[in-house]
Image (cartoon, helix red, strand yellow):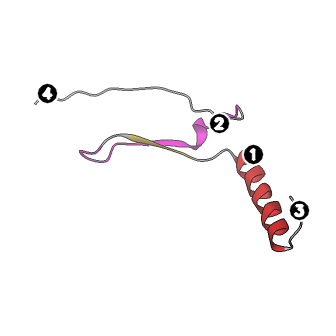
């Protein structure tokens, strides 16, 4: 079976527009499919954490949303 190598360059962006290339790593595990892991955007991660914290507080104390 022939053996070949392919190099692909791409950029990854969050839905907020922040570049996520510094937090992305590619892997090719043996005979498995190649894949990319992307770390979440720190800004969006903090916003979602704060949103979840606020919603949990309101649910816990019975406050209207």
What's the CA distance linking mark 4 and mark 3? 64 Å
User: Which range is magenta?
Assistant: 17-32
Tell me the residue at 74%/52% (across/down).
48
Tell me the residue at 75%/45% (across/down).
43
Residue that carries the numbered disc 4 in the rendered image? 2
What's the CA distance linking mark 1 and mark 2? 10 Å
Of pointers 2 and 3, the one earlier in the residue sequence? 2
Q: Nearer the viewer, residue 46 or 11?
A: 46
Q: Position of residue 52 (x, y in %)?
A: 75, 59
Of pointers 3 and 1, the one earlier in the residue sequence? 1
Tell me the residue at 49%/43% (across/down).
25
Q: Is the residue under label 3 in contact with that under label 2 (CB below 8 Å)?
A: no
Q: Which numbered dot is residue 43?
A: 1
Residue 21 on the magenta segment: yes
Q: Is the residue under label 3 in contact with that under label 4 (CB below 8 Å)?
A: no
Residue that carries the numbered disc 3 in the rendered image? 64
* Nearest to viewer (mark 2 / mark 4): 2
Q: Is residue 14 above or below residue 30?
A: above
What's the CA distance linking mark 1 and mark 4? 45 Å
């Amino acid at each position: 079976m022939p053996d070949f190598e392919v190099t692909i360059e791409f950029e990854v962006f969050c839905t907020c527009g922040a570049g996520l290339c510094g937090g992305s790593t590619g892997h090719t595990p043996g005979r498995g499919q190649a894949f990319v892991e992307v770390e979440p955007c720190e800004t969006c991660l903090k916003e979602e954490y704060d949103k979840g914290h606020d919603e949990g507080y309101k649910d816990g104390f019975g406050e209207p949303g």
